[in-house]
Amino acid sequence: MPRPIEALVHRAALAHNLEVARRRAGDARVWAVVKANAYGHGIERAFPGLQHADGFALLDLAEAERVRALGWRGPVLLLEGCFEPRDLELCSRLDLWHAVHCSEQIDWLAMHKTHVPQRVFLKMNSGMNRLGFTPAAYRAAYARLAALPQVAEVSLMTHFSDADGPRGVAHQLAVFDETTADLAGERSLSNSAAILRHGQALGTRNDWVRAGILCYGSAPDFPERGIADWDLRPTMTLQTRLIGTQTLAAGDSVGYGSRFTAERAMRIGIAACGYADGYPRHCGSGTPVLVDGRRSGTVGRVSMDMLAVDLSDLPAAGIGSTVTLWGQGPGGAVLPIDEVAQAAGTIGYELMCAVAPRVAMHADGD
Ligand SMILES: Cc1ncc(COP(=O)(O)O)c(C=O)c1O
């Protein structure tokens, strides 16, 4: 029998979360962002849940091929565009739209031999300072692209650095508006945090929004707000079982480094999940878990293949009990991935992308 750990992908929850994005996006069309193998869910597993999106946005050409292989004929956007000139051939063959963020990418397009002009999203660096043309260079890049026979349509995009936090989007929005006011073309500005938090400020500026993390049931602005506040549902459950129990006396310690010492007699369970499964080692004692759907916490250090959980208030729990590390537990209980991420000093994005290959992952219903 394999180790009892598994990850489940919930397609109905993906579809629900996508609907939340759609409601918040007004008239804008919605890209489901499926980069990083659909944020660790698996593109093929997630696709049926996201198939009502207006398009799919991603980074890797190989992932774009997988989306096309699933039969998707609609828009596919490469968020970072091409990495080298020959990528443009695949863009032509697979009918991919692509971001253009630097002058080298325009040079490649100008040399590209094609009879089918391509659609590009010209990216502005409006303050994130990651990818994109500065406002000062943006209009010249736009003019260059618009004049190329290889280009069918130029759309405008930018990316917010602080849509999830106190700084907000106003400073970048002002830069974007000032630079693009009289430029023709569809616009794409919002990521999940902007979709959820800044709908009013953005008004009708977006023709396309880029919904990533919200589709996957994590709140971009946790802990200020959680998934329940945004009506989002967990799309991935990491679950395992107890494979052992121990009864501790006061003063007994647990695990490597004796990081937890029992203050009184207590029972603990040993769950088949460790950092080699993608569970973060940095989670300290008290990180929330569900045991048979009831909330408890970890005790001691997470080891490679095991972690310990407190069974003090769970006398019925024992070997075989279900342990939910994050996601949907038995009886409708929910443990948002954001709570575990916070205990590990990270964000839900990282945990869902890092489930280890040795963990069997399947969609519920499959
Ligand atoms: C350009 C761009 N758009 C959209 C997204 C989606 O962001 P989120 O998952 O926060 O919605 C990302 C993710 O990093 C991105 O790089």
Image: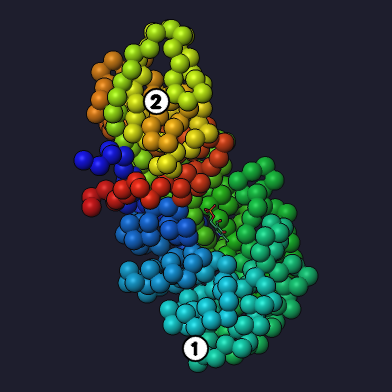
Residue shown at 43% from the left, 58% from the top: 37
346 in relation to 103, above or below: above
Ligand 1's quadrant is bottom right
Residue at the extreme left of the image, as rendered: 1
Mark 1 in CB contact with mark 2 (< 8 angstroms): no
Residue shown at 74% from the left, 67% from the top: 134
**Could you say which quadrant of the image residue 50 lies in?**
bottom left
Q: Which residue is mark 2?
A: 308
Q: Which residue is mark 1?
A: 116
Q: Position of residue 192 (x, y in %)?
A: 53, 52
- Closest to the observer: 328 or 54? 328
- Closest to the observer: 360 or 252? 252
Residue shown at 54% from the left, 81% from the top: 86
Sequence-first tag of 1 and 2: 1
**Could you say which quadrant of the image residue 38 lies in?**
bottom left
* Left or right, residue 65 beside residue 119: left
Residue shown at 67% from the left, 60% from the top: 130
* Left or right, residue 173 beside residue 228: right
Observer able to see residue 215: no
- Label 1, secondary structure: give it: loop
253 in relation to 342, above or below: above
Q: CA distance from mark 1 to mark 2?
A: 59 Å
Q: Which amino acid type is marked by label 1?
A: Val
Q: Which amino acid type is marked by label 2?
A: Ala
Q: Position of residue 340 (x, y in %)?
A: 47, 35
- Label 2, secondary structure: give it: strand
